Amino acid sequence: MTAAPPPSRSAEERTTTQVMRQLVPSVYVPTLLEFSGNSALLPVIPLMALALGFDVPQAAALSLVFGIFSFLGPIPAARLISRMGARPALVLTGALLVVSNVVAYLLITPGLQGDPALRHRLALIAALVVMAACSQVWTLGRQAYLGSALPPGMRARGMTAFGGMIRIGQVVGPLLGAIVLGLGQDSVVFLLYAVTTAAATVMVGIFLPVGETRGSARTIPRGRSRSPLHRRLDRAVLLRMISIGCGIAPVMISRVNRPVIVPLLGASLGLDSTLISLVFGASAVLEIIMVIPAGVLMDRFGRAAVAVPCGLIMGAGYVLLAVLAAALEGHGQAAALVALLVPSALIALGNGLGSGIVMTLGIDVSPVHGRTGYLAWWNTLMGAGRLVAPLVVSGVTIVAPVAAAGAATGVLCLAGGLWLLRALPRLTPSGGTRAGGGRPVPARRG
């Protein structure tokens, strides 16, 4: 019997277009909305912290809240999604995000207008705790849904499109943030985040189809109920995740540290919050430009073709940021803007090249059965990077300027890129010439 011919390029393109179109209102636009508000808020948090009476190391340490929840939150988030279903869990946590931002605005604004007190600082910490907890459910829920909705041959393109929405949000958010900052107190960005998250939550509630059914998303398996074969599979998956995670975690560290290091360094150079927000917006344009090339490169030539240069370019950008900040400090506002903008653009270029790489790798290394649970493992490992990130900044700034924290972040990122150059091609799809993506490497697939 003659084998069926492979699908034509036009048929593949139609399938890709159809899948992507279905994901627009359910995943991509809500992601754009939510990250627009998030990106408007994050660069302002360290500045609000300084105004409320935190010192520089304490302001940098506030991002430790997100690191703790990134490390401890994925497994509880997977259990919540398993019990409720992805859509109800996303709607519930989205509503909590809206309420928490409105309350934060009401409680923190008086501290920015007058003499800040302990209650204002505690309100900021509490708001960050709620945001960090809810964001874990949103991250895991969307990632697990995309893992099941995207065909393997277009997985990287679909995930980079998801990353592209994040990048567009990182352009729109700081620009919107700059507008609202010009109209009132810095705390107004809390209301902006509440509005964008409310719109995103409504779209998720209306358009997100039912994905994994409740109870099917396995979390951490209990050893006594698992067969020896399943335990061997779990060990193989975990070892593969750790090997890749050692190289990709520095990318996570650099991403977490950017909205901390860049604003603090900008403030030390004498730039105001509006100019710093504009630097974030301008840098994010480069990230958007790299979204489509990143997805094509990953699907055609393998994950290493993107992950390695992502780590190396971001690392070089952070080192350059430290060098220029030290060299141009005290030379006027124009020199300070150059010292912040040029390295930020290089960091953004590498970050845009890595659009969706962390989530794509998570799906690559997670078996199909019980994927939500395995993704919780992966996100926990990535959360370790988020947990380390603010410790790097806080620890360095205790004994050295903020520029030194940027240099330390850059060195970690360079080391991660070099490690991925060795480890990644053996453990993920290697790429190829087929339009649908590369062939998987059989070695150590678990």
Image (cartoon, rainbow, N blue to C red):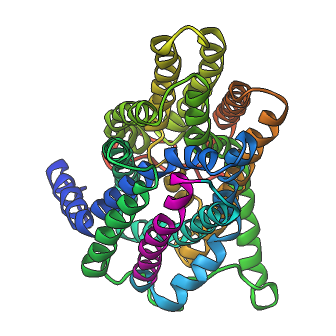
Give the residues drawn in magenta, as a range: 89-114
Q: Is residue 120 above or below residue 410?
A: below
Could you tell me which residue is drawn at 55 percent across and 23 percent down? 270
Image quarter hosting the C terminus: bottom right
Q: In this view, does 200 lie to the left or right of 373?
A: left
Residue 217 figure quarter:
bottom right
Dominant secondary structure (helix, strand or loop) of the stretch shown in magenta: helix
Q: In this view, does 161 lie above or below 57?
A: below
Image quarter hosting the N terminus: bottom left
Q: Is residue 246 left or right of residue 94?
A: right
Residue closest to the eye, 101 or 383: 101
Task: Indicate the position of residue 369 as horizontal and vertical percent values.
Answer: 54, 77
Task: Indicate the position of residue 101 as horizontal and vertical percent values.
Answer: 46, 67
Q: Which residue lies furthest to the front in this view?
A: 114
Q: In this view, does 308 lie to the left or right of 227?
A: left
Could you tell me which residue is drawn at 68 percent across and 57 percent down? 67
Residue 94 among magenta residues: yes
Task: Indicate the position of residue 105 as horizontal and vertical percent values.
Answer: 46, 64
Q: Visible in this render: residue 361?
A: no
